[in-house]
Image (cartoon, rainbow, N blue to C red):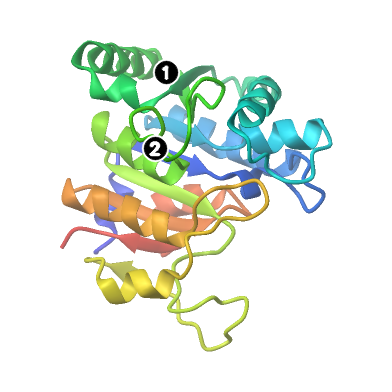
């Protein structure tokens, strides 16, 4: 019964991270993208409203240019993001088109949200896309945004961006797809005693401590702490969040059917 709010969600933001889009060779994982496109297209056809927040521009660009590590200099990040964003949207377009689903690209910087006129335009654009049964694919505009420490232009990570999108377009649910199948009391890859949480109503300092380091991996930024912070942002606005595995994106359909998938952050 506690997951009824998730089952009944109408407007849903789904966020997928860089590591979930790439395989072990740091190349695009086409099978996973296909399953993601199928699942989100199916939900749209079932009457849901879907927004996809996708990382990956810098990772895909770096991989395409044979750059082994995420660039550290801002101009280099911007350059590889410009390359990667074109590749990423081309791939998304191909797979979503296969399932008869139209998509649209939305690139954001924080200042768009900060200024009333651009914020209103952003909301109008997002609502128009969804009214026309188009899935907005949102990413931070890494090509022009500046240092991650400059909060006037950058969100810094796409967990934060996805929470902002969910709150500003009045979503019912945020689904964070990641490389683990939920939130654990410890790292399940190194601690066999780690316990997965099914439902969380409040994010405490103890839970934040369990999340460990914020450090992402090769091409990504962020970690489990940023996901908990995103979930807290949604709880503060009476919205729900689920952290679940990206390995089989079609489980999103099972989640929306009411199954106990991932860790759900639900208002009491």
Q: Is residue 233 above or below residue 66?
A: below
User: Can you give x and y, in whole percent of width and height, for residue 65 in the image?
Assistant: 81, 31
Q: Residue at x 25, y 24 (%)?
A: 114
Q: Quadrant of residue 142?
A: top right
Q: Quadrant of residue 245?
A: bottom right
Which residue lies under the disc numbered 2? 161
In the image shown, does 73 or 180 lie closer to the viewer?
A: 73
In the image shown, does 156 or 84 lie closer to the viewer?
A: 156
Which residue lies under the disc numbered 1? 133
In the displayed structure, does residue 76 sit left or right of residue 231? right
In the image shown, does 3 or 152 lie closer to the viewer?
A: 152
Q: Quadrant of residue 209?
A: bottom left
User: Can you give x and y, in whole percent of width and height, for residue 264 in the image?
Assistant: 35, 61
Mark 1, mark 2: which one is toward the viewer?
2
Q: Quadrant of the C terminus?
A: bottom left
In the displayed structure, does residue 194 sit left or right of residue 125? right
State the CA–CA distance, disc 1 to disc 2: 22 Å
Disc 2 packing (10 Å; few <14; some 14–19; many ≥20): many
Q: Residue at x 78, y 37 (%)?
A: 63
Say whether disc 1 or disc 2 marks the residue closer to the N-terminus. 1
Return the mark for residue 175: none
Q: Residue at x 42, y 40 (%)?
A: 149
Marker count (numbered): 2
Q: Are marks 1 and 2 in contact (CB under 8 Å)?
A: no
Task: Tell me the element at label 2.
Answer: helix
Task: Tell me the element at label 1.
Answer: loop
Viewer can see residue 10: no
Q: Quadrant of the N terminus?
A: bottom left
């Amino acid at each position: 019964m506690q997951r009824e709010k998730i089952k009944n969600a109408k407007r849903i933001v789904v966020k997928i991270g860089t590591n979930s889009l790439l395989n072990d060779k740091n190349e695009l994982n086409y099978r996973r993208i296909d399953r993601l496109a199928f699942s989100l297209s199916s939900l749209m056809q079932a009457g849901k409203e879907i927004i996809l927040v996708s990382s990956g521009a810098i990772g895909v660009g770096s991989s395409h240019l044979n750059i082994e590590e995420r660039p550290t200099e801002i101009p280099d990040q911007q350059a590889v993001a410009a390359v990667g964003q074109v590749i990423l949207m081309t791939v998304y377009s191909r797979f979503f088109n296969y399932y008869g689903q139209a998509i649209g690209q939305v690139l954001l910087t924080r200042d768009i949200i900060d200024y009333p006129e651009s914020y209103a335009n952003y909301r109008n654009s997002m609502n128009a896309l969804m009214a026309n049964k188009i899935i907005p694919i949102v990413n931070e505009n890494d090509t022009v945004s500046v240092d991650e420490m400059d909060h006037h232009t950058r969100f810094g990570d796409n967990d934060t961006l996805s929470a902002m999108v969910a709150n500003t377009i009045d979503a019912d649910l945020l689904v964070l797809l990641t490389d683990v199948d939920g939130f654990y009391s410890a790292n399940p890859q190194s601690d066999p005693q780690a316990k997965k949480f099914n439902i969380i109503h409040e994010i405490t300092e103890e839970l934040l401590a369990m999340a460990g380091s914020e450090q992402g991996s090769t091409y990504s930024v962020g970690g489990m702490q940023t996901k908990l912070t995103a979930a807290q942002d949604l709880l503060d606005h009476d919205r729900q969040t689920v952290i679940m595995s990206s390995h089989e994106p079609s489980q999103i359909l099972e989640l929306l059917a009411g199954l106990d998938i991932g860790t759900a952050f639900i208002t009491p």
